[in-house]
Image (cartoon, rainbow, N blue to C red):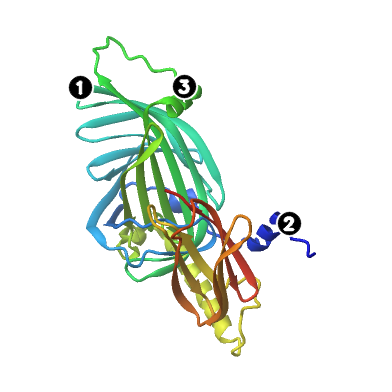
Amino acid sequence: MKKALPKLFILSMILTSLPVLAQPVLRKEYNMFRGEDVIIKQQVKFKHPGRAGDNVLWDFSKQEAVNEKYKLSYTRSDSVVTGCEHRTLYHYLLRNDSLFSLGYENTTTLMENQRPELLLTYPFAYQKRIEDYFYGTGNYCRRLELTAQGRTFTQADAYGMIMLPNGDTLQHVLRVRSVKKIAEKMVPSVQKDSIILPIIHTDSIDYHLNNDSAWMQVETYRWYADGYRYPIFETVESTTYKANKPFNHFNTAFFYSPDEHGYLNDDPENLAKLDEQEKADEKARENASGNNGHSSGNDPNKELINYNAYIERGSNQLSLEYNLNESAEVTISLYDMQGRLLVNYPKTLHPSGFYQEAISLDGFQLGEYLLRIVVNDKVYGEKIIKQD
């Protein structure tokens, strides 16, 4: 009788790890907000941000504009930088290498963070992770007192290449994911003779996040490309939880067109970076054209594929988008967590270029699955989760 292979061995064969290549890094001299910068971005339709990991392909080329002129501007006063967006002022402070949110204000609401929210620490590289608490108080229309407290988790969770709505394709892109959990309270204002700053305990913040009947989560993804101070793409999704049941509040996305990055005319650091990257790409193209027609697939520093795999909320379909950097044989398979083959697209020779596959999950139970992509002799693996 033939002995079955151990389950862990089968899964390790499916999820073969690959070496991590050089990725972009966020640095304050290149990526910190600057007073007097004005950016015109487009609000576009939301799309699932896709997988985390190495050599991801993000295809936002088909995202339709909702608002083509969405203005974002910055001013500076002493050490505080203020961003103005959608009739709201957001106040930021860079302390040493840490970027904090001090709060926000508009015509109806004022929120001041007694414990500032930690947004980033510089430098911020792929797989770096930070987490901290925040606590703020304020008022709504001077009639209701507001309290907002919670925890923010931020991680550079992916890098790769991005296809933008204006037709541009950029490489050397780093994605930063931020998850903010907020417990809010609103009560009628009470006249006070003196201002007493609250005593903030993280245990109390955790208690509210774990026990309040309602709380909110805001998940933001930002894509940064080498040579651009601000993100080039952004998605925002807000979810309200009531009795631990999620309710989608809203989602949207923003496209920061490189054509509209007028601040670059006064940004010598990033202009030099763009020039350096253009020269490096040109040299790579020259090396490829001088290869006498031989395939570069044996180059250990060159990835054959950038890909993205995801399931849209409420969908029964696994979307796979991938870009082949040269002609290659591709096999696509889907397994359950016991290593059983469920779906198989047999080995096929594809020319270089962009491809899309839609894998039906009708009849599949909720839970985890394993996507396996073989490109020539390289194996790529991705855990996929089907949920409500």
Local crowd at mark 1 within 10 Å, few (<14), some, or many (≥20)? few
The residue lying at 47 percent from left, 72 percent from top is 278
* 263, 88: nearer the viewer: 88
Say left or right for 136 vs 70.
right
Residue 316 visible in image:
yes
Tag nearer the camera, 3 or 1:
3
Asked if residue 61 is positioned above or below residue 365 in the image, the reply reads below
Pointer 1: what residue?
143
Residue 252 image point, x, y percent: 31, 51
Residue 140 image point, x, y percent: 23, 27
Query: In this figure, what is the number of numbered marks?
Result: 3
Pointer 3: what residue?
204
- Please state which amino acid type lies under the numbered disc 1: Arg
Q: Which mark is residue 6?
A: 2
Say left or right for 2 vs 20.
right
Q: Earlier in the sequence, mark 2 or mark 3?
A: 2
Asked if residue 43 is positioned above or below residue 215 in the image, the reply reads below
- Please state which amino acid type lies under the numbered disc 3: Ser
Q: Earlier in the sequence, mark 2 or mark 1?
A: 2
Mark 3 to mark 1 CA distance (whole Å): 25 Å
Local crowd at mark 2 within 10 Å, few (<14), some, or many (≥20)? few
Tag nearer the camera, 2 or 1:
2
